[in-house]
Image (tube, rainbow, N blue to C red):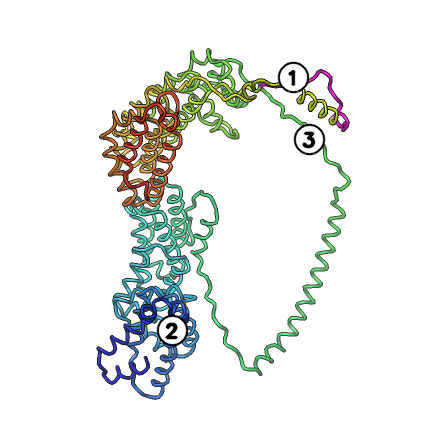
Amino acid sequence: MWEVCQQQARGGPAELQDALLAGVVALPDRVSNSLRGRNPAVFFPQNYFPLLGAAIVEVLHEISASLRGGSDCSISFVSQVLGKVCVHGRQKEILSVLVPRLADLTKSDCIWQRICWRLVECVPERWMEAVVLGFVQRAPGADVLSRLLGNLVVKNKQAQFVVTQKFLLLQYGYTTAVLQNLLGYLSLDSLRRALLIKVLQELLETWSSSSAVKHSPAEQQEYISKAILICLSHLKEPEIESCRQELLTSMMEGVKCHLDSSLPQIRRLGMIVAESISSKINTDGPVLKFQYEEDDEARELKSLLVQAPSICAVPSLPDDNRNEKADAALPLTSESNGKSHTAATHVVSDEESDAELDSDDDLTPYDMSEDKELKKTKAPVYIRDCIEVLTGSEDTDKWEATVKALESLVRKNPAATREVSVELAKILLHLEEKTCIEGFAELRQRAQVAVLTVDPIPVAQYLTSQFYSLNYSLRQRMDILDVLVLAARELSFPKVHGKIKHVEKPCVQLLPGSDSSNDWRKIVDERIKSKTRRFAKGPSQVQVASGPNEFNSVAGHFFFPLLQNFDRPLSTFDLLGEDHFVLGRLVHTLAVLMYLAVNTVAVTAMGKALMEFVWALRFHTDSYVRQGLLSCISSVLLSVPAEHLLNNMTEELLETQSWLGDVVEKDPDGDCRRDQKIRNRCTVGQKFAFGIINNTHIIHPAARLKTTTTPWVINMKIWSLLLGNFFEE
């Protein structure tokens, strides 16, 4: 390589240089092809390219000596070798040798710094991205990266595009350390700081874009948020003053977009970034403050706002000066130690005296384990009394007792509850907390579920009609959905619990703690067992819970009204507009209701209506809504009998096939793609493992094959028709 560098300085032939370049980089492959895999270990790529990196360092030493001696030489061939090795994916092997050596050589030598800068600048543009990425990932810090690259991003347009656009806005798979190196490198020179401010503006523009928030994966949004926080940590006061208005505008637009998201992770990212921007632009005045869970991720994001101190080597003093400094520091140290020892003695003595005076060791605490809270008022006994207390009473203690006792009272008096069920449901839907009751929301929800299960049809009709009515908050509408799901689950489960047959115990009770009694009891039981003849065994002691499915007759009242008006916007409620979070909750609710309606009479009609609903919303922009739509598809496949799927929904299944393929391959949200692949496997596996679901019970495929092969063939047709080749993935 050194000879080629000398020839380039004298104008050597380019064909020879290209042949040598290809031979040097592809030598391991050529040796392996020639020796048919029996090549020596030194030609393994993990061994060869570190040796090539060491050879490049030796060539750079020759170039340094030549420059110091006043001779001309070219470094472009070494740059081409470095670029081609990196673009072939061997950055780790070659730069693990180059970067540490160059970092040491460029610490205090300006000639080595210029050699290193020239080495990177001469890399051809088609290989520039791989080389810059390798240096950014391998550099131990931003200061080292600045010494190695210099002002490359200012001189080279390709490097500038890679650093300011591709690494930050088009890709998001790099670690936080890479981001800190990259943005710290832009901040360490006055010529590059203009690019830092430009990068911050572009990041904020992306962060505050509603389209980017809706369509970008959560990982990319977290990556952009980290980059914004690191940029803010490098800004100085004059720079903040110059772009204060732009920061404020971007903050207001961005926090609105993030808070409108249905994903908690995205909302919290918006809160943290908005708090950070507010603390930077309002150093003296009030700042934004949100309430969110403080976990490790949140603390990591906030720590990025504080610029980590760069580790700089302290210049060493001469030996004489060092000894003088140390001798001068000794008396001060001993004097300060004496003063601190005296102060500590006084503090300890004062604490001991206070402890002796305030000692309460002689006082024994009262036993309050069996104490009970004194109840000032009794809870109402009748349902109508509860209604009067909840609507008009000013007695807070009585109101609190009523809220706590309402659920049990409703379940104990179903006949009385049915007389006022709709009125009671209306009161509970609008009930607000008068006093600070622990678990008030849960108590109110349980009471609503109790009323709905006692009188399902009229209460379900009232709640579903109020879901699309005016003058309700989003919280109340989501409460309606939660109550419907919990009540449907309770109604669909059997009420008769498992009966346990208890063996009659003998009338004579033995005293506990007697070992001999246990021994003779064991001996007697064994004798009885050995002399008893059993001709047949009865049923097991624990019987499987069984009972009528109460959700069978009311499933339609829970389900169909929720599908009626979802596309009709109201003045305060727009499911297809800004209230897409409630739409996501509605879609998930419909999926759960569909799943709970298995083996009911209306399940086929429900499945057909739900497939049409899914088809109308399949291209929704919110990922939470799309995840709910995938849940709806799974619920339909698991709940509707296979025969009815083929007979009544063949067209819907064919249309769903192409859409599911697009979800798996093209959906912008990674969770949607991953969830759909999992659902494909789980749904198919569950269908084939447990048999065919029909209107009454589940029959294993093996049992079906003894009588007829038609259901099994139908199942095979459905899955091959709907899922295609997804199961193979």
Sooner in the amino-acid sequence: mark 2 or mark 3: 2
Residue 416 is covered by the magenta coloring: no
Q: Which residues are magenta?
A: 501-517
Q: Residues within 10 Å of mark 3 (few under 14, many from 20)?
A: few
Could you give the CA–CA distance between mark 1 and mark 2, rounded to whole angstroms? 86 Å
Residue 504 is covered by the magenta coloring: yes
Q: State the image coordinates of residue 504 (x, y, percent, origin top left).
A: 65, 17
Sooner in the amino-acid sequence: mark 1 or mark 2: 2
**What secondary structure is found at the residue carrying circle 1?**
loop
Figure quadrant of residue 635: top left
Could you give the CA–CA distance between mark 3 and mark 1, rounded to whole angstroms? 40 Å
Residue under circle 2? 53
Residue 448 visible from this viewpoint: no
Q: Residues within 10 Å of mark 2 (few under 14, many from 20)?
A: many
Residue under circle 3? 368
Give the residue type that dot 2 points to: Gly
- Quarter holding the C terminus? top left
Q: Are marks 3 and 1 in contact (CB under 8 Å)?
A: no
State left or right for residue 651 relative to residue 245.
left
Residue at the image position 54 percent from the left and 82 percent from the top: 318
**What secondary structure is found at the residue carrying circle 2?**
helix
Residue under circle 1? 504
Residue 641 visible from this viewpoint: yes
Label drawn at residue 707: none
Q: Nearer the viewer, mark 3 or mark 1?
A: 1
Sooner in the amino-acid sequence: mark 3 or mark 1: 3
**What secondary structure is found at the residue carrying circle 3?**
loop
Magenta stretch, main secondary structure, is loop
